[in-house]
Image (spheres, helix red, strand yellow):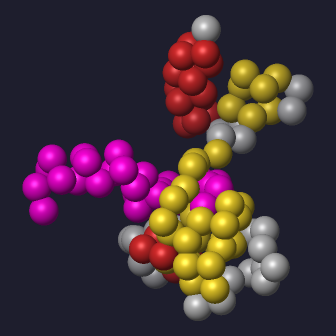
Amino acid sequence: MSTELHIELAARMPWLSAEPDSMWVASGKSPHGSFTDCLVRALPPMVTGSETPVFEVLIYAQLGYCVPASSVTTAKELLLVMADDPRTAYYVDDQPTLDAHLKAER
């Protein structure tokens, strides 16, 4: 697969390269049926045994099941922030992304 195709795929479907423990609001299909706008967490590869992201569904009628990234049709990544200062990311690695979003809002 070409580098250009990887870049385009990452832009259109960023959840395919989700960082471990990142949080997302996702929709898609699973063996349990369709899910819409559910909170999911990317599981670490050491838990799943796969480098391809697998998401644990955290809010749904049937809690505790997992779906592969290929089952997700749409998703938005969530950034956790400090409750007492929403301009500060909970995870230090997320601060540049949060700063970029805050700058864009000005």
Residue placed most toward the observer, 42 or 101:
101
Q: Is residue 45 above or below residue 104?
A: below
User: Does 2 lie within the magenta span?
Assistant: yes
Residue 66 seen from this side: no
Residue depicted at x 59% and y 65%: 27
Q: Which residue is most to the top? A: 106
Instruction: From the viewer's perspective, tell me whether residue 27 is left or right of residue 88.
Output: left
Quadrant showing the N terminus:
bottom left
Please name whichever residue, 69 or 89, is drawn nearer the observer in this view of the structure: 69
Part of the protein shown in magenta: 1-26
Q: Quadrant of residue 63?
A: bottom right
Q: Residue furthest right?
A: 84
> Which residue is drawn at the image coordinates 53% and 26% (left, top)?
96
- Residue closest to the eye, 19 or 64: 64
Q: Residue, x 23% and y 53% (percent of image)?
A: 6
Q: Nearer the viewer, residue 80 or 38?
A: 38
Q: Give percent across and percent down for residue 89.
A: 68, 32
Outermost residue on the bottom side: it is 31
6 within the magenta span: yes
76 vs 93: above or below: below
Q: Is residue 59 visible?
A: yes
Q: Position of residue 33 (x, y in %)?
A: 63, 86
The quarter of the image holding the C terminus is top right
Q: Is residue 8 above or below residue 33?
A: above
Q: Is residue 90 above or below residue 20?
A: above
Left or right: 67 as drawn, with respect to 87 = left
Q: Residue at x 65, y 41 (%)?
A: 79
Tell me residue 101's x, y (percent): 57, 24
